[in-house]
Amino acid sequence: MNFLSDTTAPAHPKLLEALTAANAGFAMSYGADDISARVETRLKEIFETDLRVLFTVSGTAANALTLATLCPGHGAILCHDEAHIHRDERGAPEFYTGGAKLIPLRGAHAKISLDELDRALDEIPEGFVHTSPVRTLSLSNLTESGTAYTVSEVTERAGRLKDRPAFVHMDGARFTNALVSLGCSPAELTWKAGVDALCFGATKNAAMGSEAIILFPSVLDRFEELQMRQKRGGHMAPKMRYLAAQFDAWLADDLWLDLAGTANRQARRLAVGLAATDGVEILHDVDGNEIFATIPADVAEHMRAAGVQFYQWPDGSARLVTSWCTSDNEIDAALKAIRRDLKL
Ligand SMILES: Cc1ncc(COP(=O)(O)O)c(C=O)c1O
């Protein structure tokens, strides 16, 4: 009953088989291999558009390299105050952009509120020499509270930048969880809604370690710059075929969607059980595979004693994350562990 993080989950066997299959003989290096090309073709079908892709081993690298490609060092990146790029990347976006200013904005459930966005844009006029101009808006989907921006919520926010020379970055470390929960198409949730570049995470959804940076048509002309930055930043895997092979297997036969569907479903089951427990409050909609809740100390202690693992924050709230391999048995056992308080 490990609900610490989806990154504690193992890799899916099919992805490991794909690594073995990719291990046959010689292949071109630095992304010029056949598997990388095949994945790019598949992504064009999935996203229904022209695009370019590069692979990295971590979401932090994907975010930092993408932001550096979109935003100059003298520019500003608007993001949510809770954003991983703001709170949890040890300054990597600032470092890789060469000093771009991250401006954190508020909004309930880790979604940037339109009022906050409008206020920030009003306060930062174009062409005022003293102020870092807004060059990028970064949206996380899933958000850091486990909620999903809908297509219209992405479209509205991206639309606010239309009169500026600015781009929209989407941190999609859990993009598939959001997508499956919303039931829209990948195209609708990204470039059709105004997203220019997507960091498309597979690691939290069954990969061993592979993230795709996708540049959509509006920024295709920046691909060489992205490549240059990946190399210069020390993130260009020489044997890129092994990163691509994970995506190759993951995207085949809707495996990526099925795995996120499982994680989301198990999170909902767990959330329902928790919500029915005395004193527990679910803090945000459980749109994907993350539950944030306040859990009374005695209940938390009882759960832990029964082997339910999760993080508890100092403010008393807890985070429980399901993964592609969370089983019915684990959820049943977790629910049993809290059953003495459960009103089912
Ligand atoms: C929203 C979000 N973005 C990006 C990341 C990428 O992190 P990492 O560099 O650990 O792959 C994470 C990991 O927790 C995340 O939650």
Image (cartoon, rainbow, N blue to C red):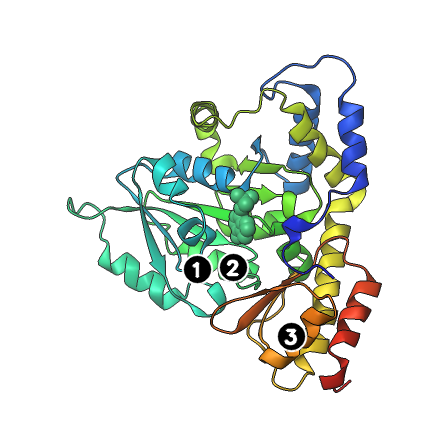
Label 3 near label 2: C-beta < 8 Å? no
Q: Nearer the viewer, mark 2 or mark 3?
A: 3
Asked if 183 appears above or below 66 in the picture, the reply is below
Q: Amino acid at mark 1?
A: Glu
Residue for badge 1: 82
- Residues at marks 3 and 1, CA–CA distance in whole angstroms: 27 Å
Tell me the residue that label 2 is attached to. 144
Number of residues whose C-alpha sits closer than 10 Å to that of mark 1, classed few (under 14), some (14–19) or many (20 or more): many
In the image, 180 versus 19, the foreground residue is 19
First in residue order: circle 1 vs circle 2: 1
Q: Would you say the residues marked 1 and 2 are in contact, meaning their CB atoms lie under 8 Å apart?
A: yes
Callout 3–callout 1 Cβ contact below 8 Å? no
Which callout, 2 or 3, points at the residue further toward the start of the chain?
2
Q: Residue 333, position in %: x, y?
A: 80, 69
Q: Position of residue 175 (x, y in %)?
A: 60, 51
User: Which residue bears the numbered disc 3?
Assistant: 301
Q: Secondary structure at mark 3?
A: helix
Among all residues in the image, which is located at the extreme right? 329
Q: Is residue 63 above or below residue 237?
A: below
Picture residue at 71% right of the left edge, 69% below the top: 268
- Which type of secondary structure does the marked residue at label 2 adopt? loop
Q: Is residue 290 above or below residue 301?
A: above
In terms of depth relative to the viewer, which is nearer, 201 or 48? 201
Looking at numbered disc 2 in the image, what kind of residue is underneath it? Glu
Q: Is residue 136 left or right of residue 213?
A: left
| Label at residue 130 | none
